[in-house]
Amino acid sequence: MAEYDYDVLVIGAGPGGYVAAIRAAQLGLKTACADGRETLGGTCLNVGCIPSKALLHGSEKFDEVRNGTFDLYGIKTGPVTLDLTAMQAQKLDSVKSLTGGIEFLFKKNKVTWLKGYAAFEDAHSVTVAGQKVTARNIVIATGSSVTPLPGVTVDNDAGVIVDSTGGLALNRVPEHMVVIGGGVIGLELGSVWRRLGAKVTVVEFLDQLLPGMDGDVRKEAAKIFKKQGMDLKLSTKVTGVAVDGGKATLTVEPSKGGEASTIEADCVLVAIGRRPYVDGLGLDKIGLEVNARGQVETDHDFRTKIDGVWAVGDVIPGPMLAHKAEDEGIAVAENIAGLTGIVNHDLIPGVVYTFPEFAGVGLTEEAAKEKGEIKVGKFPMLANSRAKTNHEPDGFVKVISDAKTDRVLGVWCIASVAGTMIAQATQAMEFGATSEDIAYTCHAHPTHAEALKEAAMAVTGKPIHM
Ligand code: FAD
Ligand code: NAD
């Protein structure tokens, strides 16, 4: 029998990798996790979910105070100024405390952090920081990186053409930021800089924002962001960006072709998606090929086709979301330990953390219709007592259910706390709920969540407050 240094070696310490490592150690397996970043937590904690939410939260407060929303409550403020350095510092504090938290959890659970980038030698050994390390099981959790836009060179240090990492670290508020890509990153970071004072133009190739979300939600998103002052150029593509000093000139034209025009900006955020990251991993050494989208493919247990090599997170197919990666991390560790680790990929909620938030789980109305007959119930946030009292009129909840069985197939939500509300919908759907089950569940009053109950009631045509 071969002897290995570890039972499990996880490559990458993002939400997929660090969670897999902690669960494997909790299950009694001798575990190491390799990552060459200065701090643990991967994209999510260092340059993704956490810093973006820190800036979204801070900029929302600034916007509220600056735009006189406080007046509504009789709160009088003086002149409001922005200390961007302090706002960036509170972001870094959050990142430091959370990445340090993972280091603490590694120590607590006896996970060894191998600080360096790992490259396969064979299916049971890698080189990390010049050392050969062997393991019975190796989990690839190397995540993703920014998709480049051909012909456009990102320089985060110069701060004129930036990707999400540069867009989170700007040390000045741009006068005019052009965001290329009206997806999640474009709208979250576009919201941050708009709230802090930039004019923001979003150039989106498709005819609507937020691909993958329900059609009604996408239409409403365009209305809401326009109302907030974003300039949306839908069905438009960027064909080139020229930089001269601190200024960028973008050439754009209709997606389907047509007359070109130019837009001047002092900051361009490229946010056209992310792609799986396997650079330098040496997959060729173990004969593992990526698919046409650059992803490592696995079976339902997260095994690759190479015995002893597993994979989770952004590097495998599915939505590139931290909670999806985390759940896969738990499942892969349980499968390695001989237990049954399962992830229901049909029910991964998605949330855009703008104001209001946009959230959804399950099928869109368009996808559900393609599968069969459906019923739809919708309830506006304007008719929800709590949203109305809080002066948050935008949004709605939409419940889509199977016309024959009433089983809920999808829930979509635009509300100030949509990201929190969607958890209930996800759990109900995980338990196979019908719209009637949600409608007859007692919801505390007054809460935004009551809008979900009313939307469920609307599936059979009987909401109370509409
Ligand atoms: P990652 O987090 O990318 O971690 C992979 C790690 O592997 C990295 O630390 C990398 O250094 C390491 N690595 C790579 N190669 C090697 C190697 N050869 N050896 C050792 N280590 C290696 N998702 C959400 O769910 N909610 C959000 O609010 C959200 N906000 C986001 C905001 C931004 C700006 C961005 C960019 C992303 C956001 N995401 C969000 C997506 C989320 O960050 C990812 O889905 C998640 O981090 C994926 O986790 P992962 O473990 O698969 O990979
Ligand atoms: P995205 O896929 O969400 O959006 C990219 C957008 O760019 C799409 O709308 C696409 O049509 C558009 N696009 C592509 N090429 C274009 C071009 N040449 N010109 C104009 N538009 C173009 O990708 P993203 O916003 O970069 O985010 C990347 C990933 O990170 C996503 O998969 C997302 O799941 C994850 N993320 C999640 C969150 C969250 O959960 N709140 C936040 C940030 C990032």
Image (cartoon, rainbow, N blue to C red):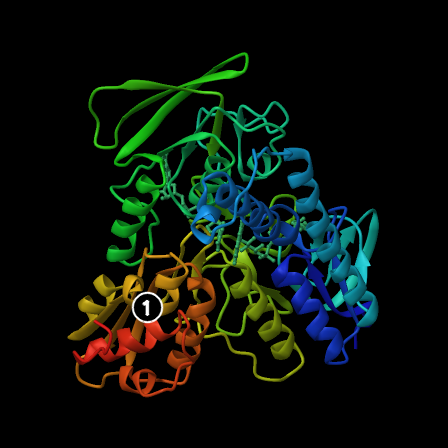
191 left or right, relative to 310: left
- At mark 1, the secondary structure is loop
Q: Quadrant of the N terminus?
A: bottom right
The residue closer to the viewer here, 30 or 374, is 374
Q: Position of residue 404 (x, y in %)?
A: 17, 84
Q: Quadrant of the C terminus?
A: bottom left
Q: Quadrant of residue 457?
A: bottom left
Q: Which residue is mark 1?
A: 384
Q: Position of residue 360 (x, y in %)?
A: 37, 64
Q: Is residue 185 visible?
A: yes
Q: Which residue is pictured at 39% across the width and 38% down the height?
A: 181
Front in this rendered view, residue 440 or 100: 440
At horizontal 47% and vertical 67% (from top left) the residue drawn is 420
Please state the horizontal and vertical placement of residue 268, each as a whole percent of the image: 47, 28
- Give the quarter of the image for residue 425: bottom left
Q: Is residue 118 visible?
A: no
| 289 to the left or right of 458 | right
Look at 74% across and 78% down and name the residue there: 26
Residue 377, quarter of picture = bottom left
